Amino acid sequence: YFILFKNSRIYALTGNGPNDLGQNNDYNQPTRLPFDVGCSEPNSVVSMSLGIMFKSKKGIYLLTRQLELNYIGADVEAYNSQQIMSADVIPQNNLVLFTCAEGLALGYDYTVNQWTTWTNHNGFDATIWKGEFTYLRTNGQVFKRNATKYKDGEQKYSLKIVTSWIKLNGIQNFQRIKRAIVLGDYYSQHIMRM
């Protein structure tokens, strides 16, 4: 399949196309897929193992390999107004990363179907270079992701994790929490506050 996007439509095209001499073209007429969305930002289109992700006027969608459309951007709807500058797959982390013009990056972990946001990633464009995520910032600097360092350039940054609500149940919704444990890996010196 070849997938063709318009602003509010999606088409599929089958065939192998012409040979090197321009002969034997077996492309069929494009078939409109029965969806009411298209791609509003061409820089948001990214091919990944589950299909093709893209941003429409309604949010971020996944067109699966079976040509089914899934809305997967519900958790990041608050960022629909942001202009996507690039979309890349970081295969080591099972992550699709969308960089935005306003300095934010939206990350989608396609193994666990979870979204994350990264701050301070305002840039013109990004790519995977020598296996690492690399992006061009608006001030002309080039940043390359380093999986062994946990700094933003040479500056420290904070990580904020929010858990889901703890549901109280039982007699009149009364419960006690006597102990909480944090489970993780220690990679570098840090201060943890809970």
Image: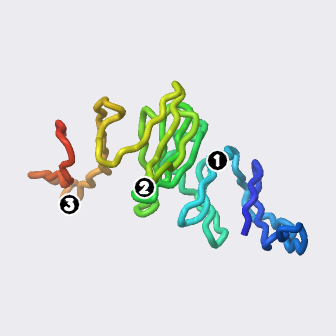
Along the viewing direction, whichever of 170 and 73 lies nearer the viewer = 73
**Which one is closest to the eye, mark 1 or mark 2?**
2
Along the viewing direction, whichever of 57 and 140 lies nearer the viewer = 140
What residue sits right under mark 1 in the picture?
A: 58
Q: Residue at x 35, y 34 (%)?
A: 152
In the image, what residue type sits under mark 1? Answer: Lys
Q: Is residue 151 left or right of residue 34?
A: left
Secondary element under disc 1, as helix, strand or loop, is loop
Please indicate, yes or no, whether residue 106 appears anywhere in the rendered image.
Answer: yes
Secondary element under disc 3, as helix, strand or loop, is loop
Which numbered circle lies on residue 167? none
Q: Local crowd at mark 3 within 10 Å, few (<14), some, or many (≥20)?
A: few
Residue 60 in the image: x percent, y percent?
59, 51
The answer to whether 144 is drawn above or below residue 110 in the figure is above
Which numbered circle lies on residue 170? 3
Q: Local crowd at mark 1 within 10 Å, few (<14), some, or many (≥20)?
A: some
Which comes before the other along the chain, label 2 or label 3?
Answer: 2
